[in-house]
Amino acid sequence: MNGWTLLLLAIVLEVIGSTGLKASQGFSKLLPSLLVVLGYAGAFYFLSLALKTIPLNMAYAVWSGAGHRPDCAFGLAGAQGAAERPNCPGHCADHRGGGDFESGLEGAWVG
């Protein structure tokens, strides 16, 4: 599997782990807690494999930018979505100066 596919898989698993974090209610609920642990463990495993072929700065920029928006969208879709709406524009929408994904990629290329 190529590095970009592994990175995509890592991002998907990180989003799954993050989604289960709130539902685990402080790791007091078994199934969401398992989702968190397995999601993050898998995410970091596949990230480590992706880093064999993708430079760390590029992988981190893609990871942080691509993972942020789905996390926000799933948070809005959840039970506490209304409380999180004021925070969403900063995470889900691109701003005139460029969102975190674009800024992260610029930093990856420059740094």
Image (cartoon, rainbow, N blue to C red):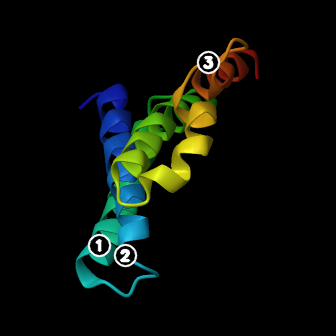
Hey, which quadrant is residue 111 in on the image? top right
Q: Which badge, 1 or 2, comes first in the chain's sequence?
A: 2
Q: In the displayed structure, would residue 80 be above or below residue 68?
A: below
Look at mark 1 in the image and give the residue it sits on: 32
Q: Amino acid at mark 2?
A: Ser
Front position in the image: 102 or 86: 86
Distance between the alpha carbons at the discs numbered 1 and 2? 5 Å
Q: Where does the image place residue 93, in percent across and percent down from the top left?
A: 55, 24
User: Mark 3: which secondary structure?
Assistant: helix
Q: Amino acid at mark 3?
A: Glu
The furthest residue to the right: 111
Residue at position x 41%, y 82% in the image: 27
Q: Amino acid at mark 1?
A: Pro
Distance between the alpha carbons at the discs numbered 1 and 3? 32 Å
Residue at position x 36%, y 27% in the image: 4
Q: Residues within 10 Å of mark 2 (few under 14, many from 20)?
A: some
The furthest residue to the bottom: 28
Residue at position x 33%, y 76% in the image: 33
Q: Where does the image place residue 35, in percent across and percent down from the top left?
A: 28, 67
Q: In the displayed structure, would residue 75 be above or below residue 106?
A: below
Look at mark 3 in the image and give the residue it sits on: 102
Look at mark 2 in the image and give the residue it sits on: 24
Quadrant containing the N terminus in the rendered view: top left
